[in-house]
Amino acid sequence: MLAETLQGPSVDWISLSPLLVLLGAAMVLLVVDALTPPWPKRLYALVTAATGLTSGVLTVVLWHQVDREGPTTLVGDAMVLDKVALWVTLVISVAVVLVSLVTDDYLRREGIDGPEVYALYLMAGIGGIVMGSANDLIVLFLGLEILSIALYVLAASHRKRIESQESGIKYFVLGGFSSAFFLYGIALLYGGTGSTNIGKIASAFAQNLPARNRDEALVLAGVALLLVGLMFKVAAVPFHFWAPDVYQGAPTPVTAFMASAAKAAAFVAMLRVLVGALPTWSDDYRPVVWTITVLTLVGGAVMAVVQTNVKRMLAFSSVSHAGFMLVGVEAAVQSIRPGDPMAAAGVDSVLLYTLIYAVLVAGTFGVVTAVSRTGDGATDLSGFRGLGRTRPVLAMGMTVLLLAQAGVPLTSGFVAKFGVITAAVDAHSYAVAIIAMVAAVIAAYLYLRIMISMWIADPESGDDGREPVRVPALLGVAIALSVLFTLVIGFFPGALVDIVP
């Protein structure tokens, strides 16, 4: 009787098509591969890249649909179809394409070729898209866990390296704590509002629902716990302590995926929570966001320059970039628009930064993948010594990507940093803008050290006996696409800026 009367929510399958494509391809990779003879080389990577490309094309189609019909909710208000959700879908699709190309030769070089890693990329992408599209905190948490569990396994996927195993267990244990904080925050917000729906939470607070002191304390505790969980996922100081070890120990292509797709999803989720669900509490959490932003900007830049392992350098660089994205978040919470909080100043700058950084970091770690050689262990500065002489084209591509990460003009990195700093100035957050510029100068020394090692450092005894750096076809394509995007957007920023939601 219950089954006959139970009615589920209507499902717009077309609007969910990017998710369904990723899910279908993941199932094909796992099930079909198990039932068929070994696939030809590169086919796993090409199928995954084609899946990401298809998801991106469907996202563009849905973008035009939203232009015509406006935003809408999906699956009983659990998810939202708007340009912010479609933007994070596009970013993750781009990351899937680039990282799958980077991963191809790496897996065969390390003797672990198989479909599992690619399927986990796709599952992590699904989790990230759900996070960015969530209109309910429980759905956001589900997306967070799908993303996180896939990343835990990916971090530990190189079973021949003890460092990979250690990074996986560290990420799993610490990530479990952060997920618990986030879930406890959801429970407290539910206790204060009676709902986990983002729109209903915002409406409840707009109507001054938590009038009693007890309810106000409950909500503030919930907001604090949500912030802890979200700041951990973006590796903001002081919740960054997992990033250097995990980035260094995880397989290098997996590190690229963590730094690109996972960070983009986490920042869009942060905007959903802080700007979408809690705009009326911005006066309470704004000082915390401001403080964490400053700590992340300064801490990431200072800690990066004292490292000697390039993957650890780039891990702290990722922390520093998280600080720049937090500059945009802080600007957004400074100027929330009543009735349309997601259109606040600063949101656009964060979204722009996520795409630019995703491409930058995928290309940068692509070069590190090639230089790390068999065993994935040659990632200290000495591994890059003399790269300008032995592989000048590869070294030139790395130089362009490093200059972009430093924010040098005529690169996409300058466009990204200029966008968040401009948003901060427009929101009258002058102190944060100045600190961000100083942090950018400090961090430039980090990228300069790598370039010096590639182009200027004198060769040492034993360098000639090292395994030569190889650049297979798909890896070369991924790096070339990243460099091309970096330069095109640097010279013609309007091509990207004009389409940001």
Image (cartoon, helix red, strand yellow):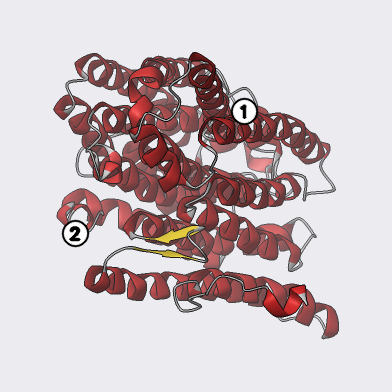
The residue positioned 53% from the left and 33% from the top of the image is 230
Q: Position of residue 455 (x, y in %)?
A: 42, 35
User: Between residues 15 and 360, which one lies in front from this camera angle?
Assistant: 15
**CA distance for labels 1 and 2:** 34 Å
Q: Is residue 37 left or right of residue 84?
A: right
Instruction: Assign a secondary structure to mark 2.
Output: helix
The residue positioned 59% from the left and 32% from the top of the image is 191
Q: Would residue 390 be seen by someone viewing this image from the given angle?
A: no
The residue positioned 46% from the left and 79% from the top of the image is 14
Q: Position of residue 258 (x, y in %)?
A: 57, 45
Is the residue 307 above or below the residue 257 in the image? Answer: above
Q: Are marks 1 and 2 in contact (CB under 8 Å)?
A: no
Residue bearing mark 2: 495
Sequence-wise first label, 1 or 2: 1
Q: Position of residue 170 (x, y in %)?
A: 75, 31
* Badge 1 amino acid: Pro
- Residue 244 bears which disc, if any? 1
The residue positioned 37% from the left and 15% from the top of the image is 287
Neighbours of disc 1 within 10 Å: few (<14), some (14-19), many (20+):
many
Is the residue 489 above or below the residue 463 in the image? Answer: below
Is the residue 26 above or below the residue 281 in the image? Answer: below
**Which residue ends up furthest to the front in the rendered image?**
1
- Residue 219 bears which disc, if any? none
Quadrant where the N terminus lies? Answer: bottom right
**Which residue ends up furthest to the bottom in the rendered image?**
36
